[in-house]
């Protein structure tokens, strides 16, 4: 037999027999004779050598063979299939490189979806799916957001320790796949799984969260991190001091910190030049909160730029859409219409309240004026 069979309406033993025959044909060290110990032992041996078809077989044949193994696994009782499912997933995860990465991802995703929603094995399979998705660079096909992740396991939720392990894995894979925004949300969810009682155990996760947020060139709103219990346990440590600078301080504070703790910044995997670039943008945002009009000279001084760098810097800021402004090169001024706040606390809520009250008052005034116009026209 040169190609694997698509199994339809045959017994598990017949499927196993066909798999044994095919794998033996492609050079695997497995006999065509069925095991006297039963289907589980047959499947154990088949899974052990199924990678023999990875070498020279066409992709379609590889996928059919692996799908055939899946078709047997999902028909076995849970208590008889758990170790086999884990062995199969581990075998595919190790093989998830090159052209095989997409095939192994597809097969394990099929296995995950075929398992009963109440099966605790879905959690373990999904962990392997995520690893395969990293190699195939297809993380978006198996993970959309945290809400969808929770829905996947609604019928059989992982325990807290398992969920923390899964969220850590997802965070690493999302960062590898350049999905920094989703990675940040996953890390926030991970830190939220800790309580006041065990928040001190999340020290490493909290540090990784801060490192990733600071290193991400597209993350600028860092204030929410300070409210997380595991992050609060880092108060007094250098990583927390550095985060506080990025939350509310200006560029000179960062430069002073870097001067005093250069080796620490480097040990965190942070790039000093990128940090300076980010702090300049954050400093500009803070200046824009209180100044609707800024001279180039002020920007140059506050951000420690060369005179010829101001215009290009402002253009880069406008590209981020964090600040809405208009630049007048002739008068060398920047006119700010709005900016994202670096922090959003009681003061910002009060400003928003005052603005809404003002809008309400203006609308009521317009409404009264319109009534007067209508009444004047009806009396004529």
Image (cartoon, helix red, strand yellow):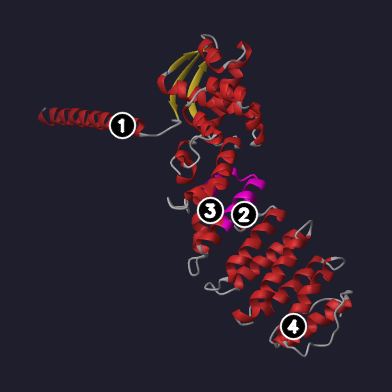
Residue linked to disc 4: 41
Residue linked to disc 2: 169
Mark 3 or 4, which is nearer the eye? 4
Residue 47 point in image, percent of width and height: 76, 74
Residue linked to disc 1: 350
Q: Is residue 139 above or below residue 47?
A: above
User: Is the residue marked by circle 4 packed among few (<14), some (14-19), or many (20+) residues within 10 Å?
Assistant: some
Provide the secondary structure element on which disc 1 rests.
helix
Mark 2 or 1, which is nearer the eye? 2
Determine the residue positioned at 61% across, 22% down: 259
Can the viewer see residue 6 in this picture?
no
Q: Looking at the image, is mark 2 or mark 4 earlier in the sequence?
A: 4
Q: Looking at the image, is mark 3 or mark 2 earlier in the sequence?
A: 3
Mark 1 or 4, which is nearer the eye? 4
Q: Are marks 3 and 4 in contact (CB under 8 Å)?
A: no
Residue 145 — which label? Answer: 3
User: Is the residue marked by circle 2 packed among few (<14), some (14-19), or many (20+) residues within 10 Å?
Assistant: some
Q: Is residue 304 above or below residue 105?
A: above
In front: 121, or 378? 121
Q: Are marks 3 and 2 in contact (CB under 8 Å)?
A: no
Residue 169 point in image, percent of width and height: 62, 54
Quadrant of the rendered structure where residue 130 is?
A: bottom right
Q: CA distance from mark 1 to mark 4?
A: 69 Å
Q: Looking at the image, is mark 3 or mark 4 earlier in the sequence?
A: 4
Report the span colored magenta: 165-187
Q: Are marks 2 and 1 in contact (CB under 8 Å)?
A: no
């Amino acid at each position: 037999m040169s190609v694997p069979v698509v199994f339809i309406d045959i017994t598990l033993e017949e499927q196993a027999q066909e798999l044994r025959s095919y794998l033996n044909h492609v050079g695997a060290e497995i006999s065509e004779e069925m095991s006297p110990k039963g289907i589980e032992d047959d499947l154990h041996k088949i899974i052990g050598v199924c990678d023999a078809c990875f070498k020279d077989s066409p992709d379609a044949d590889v996928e059919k063979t692996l799908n055939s193994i899946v078709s047997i696994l999902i028909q076995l009782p849970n208590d008889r299939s758990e170790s086999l499912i884990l062995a199969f997933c581990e075998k595919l995860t190790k093989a998830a490189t090159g052209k095989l990465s997409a095939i192994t991802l597809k097969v394990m995703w099929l296995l995950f979806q075929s398992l009963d929603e109440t099966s605790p094995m879905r959690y373990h399979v999904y962990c392997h799916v995520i690893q395969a998705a990293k190699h195939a660079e297809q993380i978006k096909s198996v993970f959309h957001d945290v809400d969808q992740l929770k829905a996947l396991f609604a019928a059989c939720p992982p325990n807290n320790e398992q969920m923390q392990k899964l969220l850590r894995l997802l965070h690493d894979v999302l960062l590898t796949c350049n999905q920094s925004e989703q990675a940040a949300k996953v890390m926030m969810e991970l830190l939220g799984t800790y309580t006041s009682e065990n928040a001190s155990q999340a020290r490493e996760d909290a540090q990784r969260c801060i490192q990733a947020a600071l290193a991400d060139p597209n993350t600028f709103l860092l204030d929410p991190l300070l409210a997380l219990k595991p992050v609060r346990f880092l108060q007094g440590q250098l990583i927390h001091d550095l985060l506080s600078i990025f939350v509310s301080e200006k560029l000179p504070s960062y430069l002073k910190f870097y001067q005093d703790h250069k080796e620490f910044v480097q040990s965190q995997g942070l790039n000093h030049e990128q940090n300076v670039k980010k702090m300049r943008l954050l400093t500009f945002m803070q200046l824009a909160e209180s100044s609707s009009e800024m001279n180039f000279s002020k920007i140059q001084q506050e951000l420690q730029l060369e005179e010829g760098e101001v215009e290009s810097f402002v253009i880069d800021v406008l590209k981020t859409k964090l600040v809405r402004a208009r630049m007048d090169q002739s008068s060398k001024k920047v006119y700010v219409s709005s900016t994202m706040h670096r922090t959003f606390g009681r003061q910002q809520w009060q400003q928003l309240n005052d603005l809404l009250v003002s809008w309400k008052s203006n609308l009521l005034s317009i409404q009264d004026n319109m009534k007067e116009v209508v009444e004047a026209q009806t009396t004529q």
